[in-house]
Image (tube, rainbow, N blue to C red):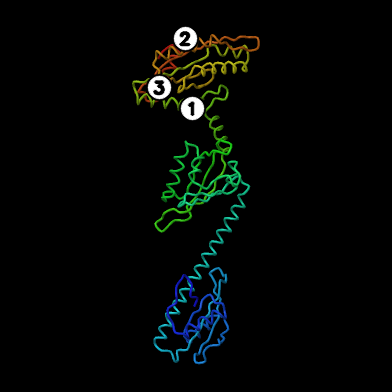
Amino acid sequence: MTPDVQGIAPPPMNDRFSGLTRLAQHYFAASSVLLVEQDELRESLRACSGVPCALPLDPGLEAGLLRHPLITDSGRQVGELILIGVSRQGLAETDVCLLTDVAQLALDALQHARNEARLQEEVERMRESEGRMALAIANTGTGVWDRNILTDEVHYSAGWKAILGYEHDELTSKISDAYQRLHPDDLGSVKAAMEAHFRGETSSYDVEHRVRCKDGNYKWLNSCGKVVDRGPDGEARRMIGTTTDITERKRLEAELQGLATIDHLTQLPNRRHFMQQLDAGLSWAQRSPARQCAVLMCDLDHFKAINDQWGHAVGDLALQHFASIVRAQLRKGDTAGRIGGEEFALLLNDTDSRKARLFATRLQARLAEYPLIHGLNSLSMTVSIGISTLRPNDAGADAGLFRSDQALYLAKQNGRNRVEEG
C-alpha cells in the first residue's frame, strides 16, 4: 500500500505485513498495494487478466500475487495495482482485522488515485480546448480574458490587447486599471451586469461598452463571459470570456438610425422622428402645465412656381436653404423637421404663443435678408407660418400640430407671408 497517498499514514501493522507491502512496491513500483486473503485473490484471478507469481517472502507465509493495471474511465493507464493474497492459515484474529483495515485503506487510495487521474485528464482536456479556441480566434479580431475574482486580477490574451493597440506586455492585470479604461457613461452598467452574473441572476455576462484605446480614442466592444468556478457557498471565483471589436457595427447602426430619422435632402428630422419629439413635448407639457411648448407649421410660398421656373434641382436648393436658416434660429432643445414637400414643423420648448410669434417673424426676416443665390440669380422666398401651443388636455401630440396647420391655412388665405395663431 502506498503510504503517502493524500498524506494518510497506514495503520500500525506487524513486521510481516509491513515487509510484504514494501517488498511489493520495491519490486513492482506499484501505485497501490492491496492485501487480501487467498480466497479473495482467487476470485480476483478469475475476474482480472494477469499472471500470478510468487514473491521471495518468508517461507512460513504462504502468498500469491496478481499485477493489475490501474485504468481510468477513458482507458488511460495511470499506474498499477498489486493484489497480494495472504493465507488465513496461521493468522490470528487480530491479524485478520488488521488485514481488513489495510485492504480498506488501500482501496481508498486506489479510488483517490482514479479520481485524481480523471481530474488531471479533465484539466488537460480543458487546456487543449482553450488552446484550440485561442488558435481559432487568434486572427478574428476577438480577444480572450480570464478573471480571478478573488484576487481582482484579469489576464488578457495578446489578441485582446491588440484590439486596443497595446503590445503584449503593456497592460497590467489589475481590474481597477481595467475600470479606468471604461467610458465613464458605461462603467455603471458594466459593473451592474457583472455583479448580477456573479450572484447567479443571469446565465452569462454580455454587455456592449466603450473602452479607451492606447491612442486615447474609444472603441465599442462586446464582452461575453461566464463564471466557470464557484466556491462551496456559490461564491464566484473565476470567470472566462471573450471580447470583440464592434466599432464598425456601431457606426453602421448609427448611419442606419440616421437614415431612419433624418430627411436626406434637408438633414432635418423627418416626419416620423419629429412626431416622436412632439409626443415627448406633450408629455413634458402635461407634467408641467405652467411651462408651454409651441408648435409652428411653415410652408414656403409659391414653391411650385420655383420648380416650374427654375427646375426641381433649384427647388431642392431652396428647401435646403430654408432648412439652414431654420437650423440657425433654433435653440438647444428645440426641434425642426420636414413634414413633407415644402412644409416644415418646429417644436419650441418653454415657449408661449407670444414668444412663438416673435420667433416666427424673426424667421421671416432672416429669409428675406438672405435670399437663395443661384449662379448670377438671387431668388427671394417668403414663408407662411401657423402657431399653436401644446395643451395638457390634448388627447395626442397631433392635436397641437392640427391647430397650427389650421392657422397656417389661415395665413395663406389672408395673403401669405403671414403669421397666424390657432
Q: Is residue 214 above or below residue 347?
A: below
Q: Quadrant of residue 258?
A: top right
- Look at mark 2 in the image and give the residue it sits on: 418
Q: Is residue 98 left or right of residue 264?
A: left
Amino acid at dot 2: Arg
Q: CA distance from mark 2 to mark 3?
A: 22 Å
Give whichever of discs 2 and 3 has the lower sequence position: 3
Q: Residue furthest right?
A: 375
Circle 1 or circle 3, nearest the eye? 1
Give whichever of discs 2 and 1 has the lower sequence position: 1
Mark 1 secondary-structure assignment: helix
- Look at mark 1 in the image and give the residue it sits on: 273
Image quadrant occupied by the C terminus = top left
Q: CA distance from mark 1 to mark 3?
A: 17 Å
Q: Which labelled disc corresponds to residue 399?
A: 3
User: Measured from the top left, where is residue 237 in percent x and y?
Assistant: 45, 54
Amino acid at dot 1: His
